[in-house]
Image (tube, rainbow, N blue to C red):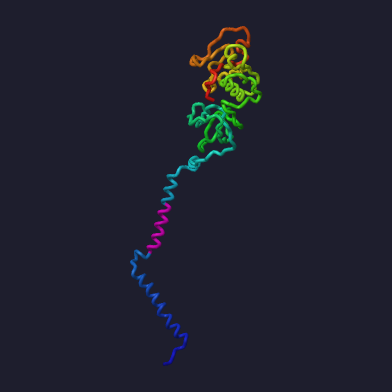
């Protein structure tokens, strides 16, 4: 048998495959209804229209940009830490006396601060939120404990021969009121002779603070009475406050230059 040239054989083999593809394409096109011929284009157009509608609706219901900015939760940034110096420092929601109190910070509590102030108020961070406290009750240094049992830095000679409660009073006052350096302990008559009294020589302003401190902490210090500026305060009549005393003839006798604390002996809990 005579064989055809190679080029003719290749062409003959390729034509049926190409013809089949063309026929299949034509058949598919013929089989589709006229309404489906543009389905792909129609679907794309519909989807684009739906997207435009959704975007339009979203833009209509979204709040203005400035309102959306307000909705962003911006956390306060700490610029340092300070200590609470008050016995109970109120933490408020806003910088004013009528704002809600959220909690109280105990003395010596360390808190982060933002550095922002508003009048007498300082901004702190409490539970990741900006809150406000009275600025004067914040300190860069940790305050000493309200009741210290450490020996007085200026000397403890006054503690010789006195009762444990009297020592408690001396050390507590010495730790908090460093300007006071002159005390009176054992000697004379009455409670002093029994070692149950301490005289704290001071000026008027500091004396007011010391007297108030002794009254507030009388249980822990074992104090039974306080005398200051010709007035007396006793535990038994504490609800009645200060009571006037008769004139004893001199500033010292009238306790104008010193606070006198009488103690039980050893009943303090500090």
Q: Nearer the viewer, residue 51 or 183?
A: 183
Question: In this picture, is 63 found above or below 108?
Answer: below
- Say which residue appears at 62% left-offset and 7% top-offset: 249
Question: In this picture, is 205 found above or below 16?
Answer: above
Q: State the quadrant of the C terminus.
A: top right
- Say which residue appears at 51% left-offset and 26% top-offset: 97
Whole-percent x and y of residue 70?
Answer: 50, 40
Whole-percent x and y of residue 101?
Answer: 48, 29
Left or right of 254 in this view: 11: left
Whole-percent x and y of residue 122?
Answer: 56, 31
Residue 246 included in the magenta stretch of the image: no
Residue 43 included in the magenta stretch of the image: yes
Looking at the image, which residue sits at the far front?
161
Left or right of 71 in this view: 113: right
Range of the magenta residues? Answer: 38-52
Whole-percent x and y of residue 246?
Answer: 57, 7
Say whether residue 250 is visible: yes
Q: Quadrant of residue 189?
A: top right
Q: Total label count?
A: 0
- Say which residue appears at 33% left-offset and 70% top-offset: 31
Q: Quadrant of residue 256?
A: top right
Q: Quadrant of residue 77?
A: top right
Question: In this picture, is 114 found above or below 265?
Answer: below
Q: Nearer the viewer, residue 45 or 3?
A: 3
- The main secondary structure of the magenta stretch is helix
Q: Nearer the viewer, residue 66 or 255?
A: 255
Say whether residue 209 is visible: no
Q: State the quadrant of the N terminus.
A: bottom left
């Amino acid at each position: 048998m005579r064989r055809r040239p190679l080029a003719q054989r290749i062409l003959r083999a390729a034509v049926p495959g190409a013809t089949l593809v063309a026929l299949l394409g034509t058949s598919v096109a013929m089989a589709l209804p006229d309404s489906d011929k543009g389905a792909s284009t129609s679907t794309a157009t519909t989807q684009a229209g739906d997207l435009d509608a959704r975007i339009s609706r979203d833009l209509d219901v979204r709040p203005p940009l400035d309102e959306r900015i307000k909705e962003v939760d911006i956390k306060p940034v700490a610029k340092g830490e300070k200590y609470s110096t008050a016995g109970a420092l109120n933490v408020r929601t806003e910088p004013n006396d009528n704002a809600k109190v959220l909690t109280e910070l105990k003395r010596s509590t360390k808190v982060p601060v933002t550095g922002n102030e508003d009048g007498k108020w300082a901004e702190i961070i409490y539970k990741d939120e900006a809150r406000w406290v009275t600025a004067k009750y914040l300190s860069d240094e940790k305050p000493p404990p309200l009741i210290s049992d450490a020996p007085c830095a200026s000397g403890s000679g006054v503690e010789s021969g006195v009762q444990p409660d009297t020592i408690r009073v001396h050390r507590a006052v010495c730790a908090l009121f460093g300007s006071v350096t002159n005390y009176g302990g054992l000697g004379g008559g009455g409670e002093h002779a029994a070692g149950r009294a301490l005289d704290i020589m001071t000026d008027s302003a500091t004396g007011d603070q010391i007297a108030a401190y002794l009254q507030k902490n009388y249980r822990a210090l074992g104090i039974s009475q306080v005398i200051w500026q010709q007035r007396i305060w006793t535990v038994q009549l504490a609800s009645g406050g200060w009571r006037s005393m008769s004139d004893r003839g001199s500033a010292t006798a009238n306790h104008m230059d010193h606070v006198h604390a009488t103690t039980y002996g050893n009943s303090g809990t500090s």
